[in-house]
Image: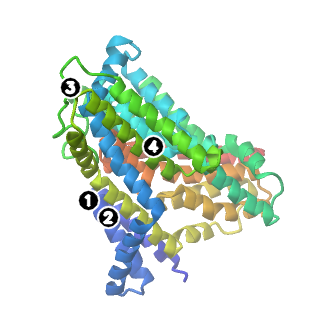
Amino acid sequence: MDYGFLTLVAPLLTLAIAIATRKVPLAMLIGIFTGQLIICGWNPFTAINEGLNCILGVCTDTGNLKTFLFTALMGAFVILVRVSGGVKGFVNFLTEQSKLVKSKRVAMLIAYVIGIIIFIDGLLSIMFTGVVTRPLIDKYKVSREKLAYICDATSAPINAIIPLNSWGAMLMGLIAAEIASGYIQGNPMTLLVSSLPFQFYSVLSLLFVLFYILTGKDWGPMKKAELRVQTTGKLYDDGVTPLLNDTDGFEELVPEGKENKWNMMLPLITLIGGTFLGLLITGGGNLAEGDGTTSILYAVTITLLIMCAMYTKQGIMTAKEFGDSVMKGVSSMMGLVILLILSFAIGRVIKGMGTGQFLASLLGDTISGAFCPAIIFLMGAVMAFCTGTSWGTFSIMMPIAIPMAVAMDANILLTIGAVVSSGIFGDHCSPLSDTTILSSMSVGTDLFSHVKTQLPYALLAAACATVLYVVFGFVM
């Protein structure tokens, strides 16, 4: 059924309520109910029933469950490396013993480099960067919002620019479908690799965050956040409840001066190494074809078992105390898991209403070929922001954009780059995106603070990308 402009009501209402009330779970619930109300012909009882079924459907999906379990277990991981003295030992090693980190700029650069190095999986990149660098960031009085921006601005863009992962496999599949349909010719991998320089938003996002790190020239809400932590020492605004708080109620069990950096470093090495190994195994020797969620879940489970052996052998805690800490860490993540469940659920509702297809249909067929990549980027960006999904945007826009580019004699490589960039924009900064939510959680701030501070930066990068697509549209 074609719902027309009604398809925009649920996502826009969700965004508006989230911004107005700062109660994102409530906004998502209202969005889910509103979408189902439209789908069910304005029958409120059917809408409530279908909304609940949608949420339960998200919870029973095996892939989603793996994501939720990994997220919950990461809460235990974060708590354990802190109470074991691993975090403090790691910070002391970098700042006092080795003198590797002497300034806030270097601390942020470490976060930036880690975010780029872990290009295999966006969720792992965010979690790993946040856990490793948060204590360093706090020590040098950098706002949690700035770290969340660094995590978010490197994860999705680098996943797309270095497509040796599931992202690359998915994009090549979409391009291959257009080749099979006869719209274009060539090799999917060759076309994707050749289009990488034209992922203007992804490239600009990485360059912009590096610029802000090196120069310190923040502006807008981010500048206010930086001034707050530098002048008052407050890591986040008054009244803000972090999605993950690993300090209240969790005391370190290691005496002062006895902290061991390996209590953090060895588990981190195990986690990242186990994930890569899992990707190789699940992908039959091919990293790009590996199952990311399964690999991460197994890796964090094995890591926790190794941590149990390490900490009990050192006498830091008993096996029972370890189990208690795990349960406390998992329970601390329940708010985030609920948020992810609602995020996935509203994504299903929006998809069911055909919001993406409706937005794509607004492109029309009267656009000059030179403007085609820029228009595709803008429409895809709006779609991705409203739906919170990059892969959904790729799946909808690629089959539309390539035939349009062929019909309008627009550059194919530029068009492919525009589709990918548009999806990255939404995945980067939409409050409905799982990576945006996880970025807030991994650094210990709230979702609204993260979105509010990074959105101006993302919009500036998107504006510059649009200009580049117009210029290159005329040149190429």
Quote the CA–CA distance across marks 1 and 2. Answer: 8 Å
Question: Mark 2–mark 4 contact, CB under 8 Å?
Answer: no
Quote the CA–CA distance across marks 1 and 3. Answer: 41 Å
**Residue that carries the numbered disc 1 in the rendered image:** 21
**Quick one: label 1, few (<14), some, or many (20+) residues within 10 Å?**
few
**Residue that carries the numbered disc 4 in the rendered image:** 299
The amino acid on which the numbered mark 1 sits, given as a three-letter code, is: Thr
Residue drawn at the location 27% of the way across and 39% of the way down:
79
The amino acid on which the numbered mark 3 sits, given as a three-letter code, is: Val
Q: Nearer the viewer, mark 1 or mark 4?
A: 4
Quote the CA–CA distance across marks 3 and 2. Answer: 42 Å
The quadrant where residue 213 appears:
top left
Q: Earlier in the sequence, mark 1 or mark 4?
A: 1
Quote the CA–CA distance across marks 4 and 3. Answer: 26 Å
Q: Under tag 3, what secondary structure?
A: loop
Q: Earlier in the sequence, mark 3 or mark 2?
A: 2
Question: Mark 3–mark 2 contact, CB under 8 Å?
Answer: no
Q: Under tag 4, what secondary structure?
A: helix
Image coordinates of residue 205 in percent, x first then y, are 53, 39
Q: Nearer the viewer, mark 1 or mark 3?
A: 3
* Residue 258 located left or right of residue 95: left
**Quick one: label 3, few (<14), some, or many (20+) residues within 10 Å?**
some
Q: Earlier in the sequence, mark 1 or mark 2?
A: 1
Residue drawn at the location 36% of the way across and 85% of the way down:
46
Residue 348 vs 276, above or below: the answer is below
**Residue that carries the numbered disc 3 in the rendered image:** 254
Question: Mark 4–mark 3 contact, CB under 8 Å?
Answer: no
Residue 293 vs 219, above or below: the answer is below
**Residue that carries the numbered disc 2 in the rendered image:** 27
